Image (spheres, grey):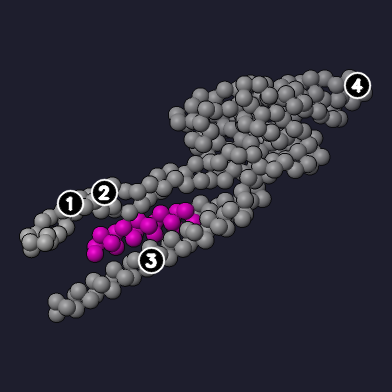
Amino acid sequence: MIDALHIAETGLNTYSTYLDVISNNIANISTAGFKKTGVNFTDLVYQDSQLRESTSTDNTNFVAHQVGLGTSVSSTYKVFTDGALVQSNNPMDLAISGSGFIEVELPDGSLAYTRAGRLTTDKDGYLNSMEGYRLSSNIQLPPDTEGIAISSDGHVLVKLSGDNDPMEVGTIELTRFMNPEALNAIGSNLYLQTKESGDAFSSVPGENGTGQLIQGYSEVSNVSLNEEMVNMMVAQRAFQLNSRVVQVADQLLETINNMKR
């Protein structure tokens, strides 16, 4: 009976975590470039239990049975399916159609990766991510820039005041990973490379398995509200069932305790 309480506790903890993940997904349904989080479940180790079994000759045998010890969340992972592309008509908005990340530089000099392609410029004219991190390609727009065009393969062209011919100022590359689901999400649509994600491979958009850039579009969250609501109902029902197991085990223990009296 004590095992029943412990097993039910693992279920409560597991589905509490699952509900937290679902809630975070729903909360970010309107966040540009957000990628939903999935959950991997695993059953805990088994132990052998000796159960008494009577034969037809009234001889008693002991038969070994395996009893599980509950469940837990083994890991969470990011789901990098493409979100819908929405036209914004803002020339500083970039959507990635396909796989790949834009590489940015953090304040400590380390590199991070994002799918949110809403670009801005800093006081020196360098292209930054929407969170204010400079693109690692170090593309600087001249002070007299009147317009900007970014091709599907990442070439950045600017139109300067008084000049009819556009000038190329750099190329935005995309970075891919062998296992992007293992990237470490640090918030603000930023991800860090991990050992499990593999090495980072940067190339011109459209080459080596990377997607292409689409100017004037923004990628929305890939969270499906219908799917998350169904997942939430399943998680809530499982949480309720484990709570019921705790109640039943408590009632049985109380009954046993009263019988001893």
SS at mark 1? Answer: strand
Tell me the CA gap for discs 2 and 3.
Answer: 22 Å
The residue singled out by tag 4 in the image is 163
Let me know if residue 222 appears in the view.
yes
For disc 3, the neighbor class at 10 Å (few under 14, some 14 to 19, many from 20) is some
Q: Earlier in the sequence, mark 4 or mark 2?
A: 2
Residue 240 place in picture, x, y as percent: 43, 65
Which numbered disc, 3 or 1, marks the residue closer to the eye? 1
| Residue interval drawn in magenta | 1-19
Residue at figure coordinates x 31%, y 58% from the top left: 7
Tell me the CA gap for discs 4 and 3.
Answer: 72 Å
For disc 1, the neighbor class at 10 Å (few under 14, some 14 to 19, many from 20) is few
The residue singled out by tag 1 in the image is 64
Residue at figure coordinates x 72%, y 41% from the top left: 85
Residue 183 place in picture, x, y as percent: 51, 35
The residue singled out by tag 2 in the image is 46
Tell me the CA gap for discs 2 and 1.
Answer: 12 Å
Residue 143 place in picture, x, y as percent: 81, 27
Question: Between 35 and 161, which is closer to the camera in this rendering?
Answer: 35
**Residue 18 in magenta stretch:** yes
Which numbered disc, 2 or 3, marks the residue closer to the eye? 2
Tell me the CA gap for discs 4 and 2.
Answer: 74 Å
Q: Earlier in the sequence, mark 4 or mark 1?
A: 1
Q: With 231 as the anchor, is 82 left or right in this view?
A: right
SS at mark 4? Answer: loop
Q: Which mark is residue 243?
A: 3
Q: With 148 as the anchor, is 172 left or right in this view?
A: left
Residue 59, quarter of picture = bottom left
The reply to whether discs 4 and 3 touch (Cβ–Cβ < 8 Å) is no
Which numbered disc, 4 or 3, marks the residue closer to the eye? 3
